[in-house]
């Protein structure tokens, strides 16, 4: 206990130092001032959040801005390294599998050693792998270091999620997670456009730019975000501390496990779409397809930025499971109709449709999971629950590669739509069950 208190006091002094305080106050003040204007009234949702939330938001923007590699990974494999569609799909599934042990390790050590330490160290290690890739040219070793990057990145995510949950409560948590999600997309609105140019003209900077942004974000968290104090109690019975290991804590919340299984169908649909979209656009438009895909990803981020606060404000009065079920319908329509799209304007319109579903899903998913996670197991739940949800993500590219090879990419879109409908139906059934049990 004394050691933890010393660490906590040290972090507290960092947050309140003369160098840090003006920065945090600046971000907070900007949000507050914009919220007072009629044109920016939607930002009022983000007023009054803890200073740590604004600091994490800034780091998230940096990470989103540097998201160069993974949006174009399937094109990197197929066009630069000579992978077939099926082989590229298999590799994308392997990346999801490699992420799993990193996430489990990260969740375990996060609960033991602290969120901030794990987050910074693992993010620096992940960035280092991309620095190596930048100097390998078209070497067949690149996929190996991409896998290592994902291993360390998997360790980062549970720590980041647990840290954000620690510094919020049930009253401001949905707004905080929504704000952090907005930060990612603020960066991501510009990242893919630049990445689309770099892919053909300076591919080395796909890796260097991604790594540089991650290192700056890690430095920012190290300087400006305190290690959250470890709490043993919560005002919410759903967040009460649990004795024992991860399995026992999970069994005490079967509704959360059932929801994670439903969410796996969403991750299957979304991952399948991300695998098929760049292949589909380049099949239709050649090299122009990569540029089109980059614009679609930027539209995705722009719609998130514009609609995020409006969606949260409009739907926050409703049960999160109800909202997530509605999100699945947007996924089903937006993704499945890509199989009929032949002209860029329709691709842009469908990007808007599925992105609205993404916003509804993302701003309710994390909120629901966090509110049902025991305070004693936040790191481990933040690693294991997403693993269940990400099962669909793990298998989607491999299945999509096989289906596209045998039946063509249009059939993949039918599969995507069905998966989203199954996830939506299951989530709505859980909502009805929880509503009747209240």
Image: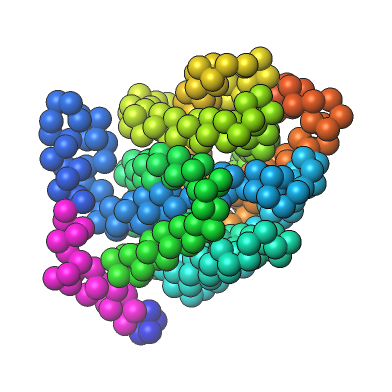
Queried whether the magenta region covers residue 21, the answer comes back as yes
- Viewport quadrant of the N terminus: bottom left
> Does 425 sit left or right of 69 as displayed?
right
Q: Farthest front residue?
A: 201
Q: Position of residue 90 (x, y in %)?
A: 78, 47
Relative to 408, residue 179 above or below = below
> Does 210 sit left or right of 108 as displayed?
left
Q: Position of residue 363 (x, y in %)?
A: 44, 37
**Is residue 108 visible in the rendered structure shown here?**
no
Please name the residue shown 30% across and 70% down the image: 223
Relative to 140, residue 237 above or below = above
Please name the residue shown 17% across and 64% down the image: 21
Q: Nearest the camera: 41 or 9?
A: 41
Please identify the quarter of the rendering in which residue 2 is found. Answer: bottom left
Please name the residue shown 34% across and 79% down the image: 7
Q: Farthest right residue?
A: 406
Residue range of the region highlighted in magenta in the rendering? 6-26
**Is residue 348 visible in the rendered structure shown here?**
yes
Queried whether the magenta region covers residue 351, the answer comes back as no
Please identify the quarter of the rendering in which residue 75 is found. Answer: top right
Q: Nearest the camera: 377 or 274?
A: 274
Q: How is the image coloured?
A: rainbow
> Does 249 sit left or right of 22 as displayed?
right
Q: Main secondary structure of the magenta part?
A: helix
Relative to 305, residue 135 above or below = below
Please name the residue shown 17% across and 45% down the image: 30
């Amino acid at each position: 206990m004394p050691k933890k208190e010393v660490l906590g006091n040290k972090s507290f002094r960092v947050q309140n130092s003369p160098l840090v305080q003006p920065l945090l106050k600046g971000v907070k003040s900007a949000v507050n001032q914009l919220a007072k204007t009629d044109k920016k009234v939607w930002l009022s949702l983000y007023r009054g959040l803890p200073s740590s939330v604004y600091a994490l938001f800034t780091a998230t923007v940096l990470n989103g801005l540097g998201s160069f590699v993974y949006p174009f990974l399937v094109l990197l494999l197929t066009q630069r390294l000579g992978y077939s569609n099926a082989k590229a799909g298999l590799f994308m599934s392997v990346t999801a599998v490699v992420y799993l042990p990193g996430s489990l390790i990260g969740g375990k050590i996060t609960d033991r050693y602290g969120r901030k330490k794990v987050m910074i160290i693992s993010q620096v290690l992940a960035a280092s792998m991309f620095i190596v890739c930048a100097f390998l040219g078209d070497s067949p070793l690149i996929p190996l270091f991409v896998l290592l990057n994902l291993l360390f990145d998997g360790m980062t995510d549970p720590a980041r999620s647990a840290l954000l949950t620690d510094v919020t409560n049930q009253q401001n948590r949905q707004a905080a997670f929504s704000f952090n999600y907005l930060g990612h997309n603020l960066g991501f609105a510009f990242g893919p456009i630049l990445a689309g140019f770099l892919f053909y003209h300076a591919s080395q900077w796909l890796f260097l730019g991604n790594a540089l942004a991650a290192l700056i974000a890690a430095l920012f968290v190290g300087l400006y975000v305190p290690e959250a104090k470890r709490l043993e109690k919560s005002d919410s019975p759903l967040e009460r501390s649990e004795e024992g290991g991860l399995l026992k804590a999970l069994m005490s919340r079967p509704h959360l496990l059932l929801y994670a299984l439903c969410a796996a169908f969403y991750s299957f649909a979304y991952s399948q779409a991300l695998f098929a979209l760049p292949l589909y656009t380049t099949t239709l438009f050649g090299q122009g397809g990569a540029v089109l895909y980059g614009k679609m990803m930027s539209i995705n981020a722009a719609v998130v930025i514009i609609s995020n606060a409006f969606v949260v404000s409009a739907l926050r009065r409703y049960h999160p499971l109800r909202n997530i079920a509605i999100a699945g319908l947007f996924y089903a329509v937006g993704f499945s109709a890509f199989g009929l799209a032949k002209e860029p304007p329709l691709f842009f319109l469908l990007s808007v449709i599925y992105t609205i579903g993404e916003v509804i899903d993302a701003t309710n998913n994390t909120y629901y999971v966090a509110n049902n996670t025991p305070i004693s197991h936040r790191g481990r739940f933040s690693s294991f629950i997403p693993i269940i949800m990400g099962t669909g993500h793990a298998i989607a590219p491999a299945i999509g590669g096989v289906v596209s090879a045998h039946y063509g990419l249009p059939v993949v879109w039918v599969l995507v739509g069905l998966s989203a409908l199954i996830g939506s139906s299951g989530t709505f059934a859980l909502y009805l069950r929880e509503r009747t049990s209240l």
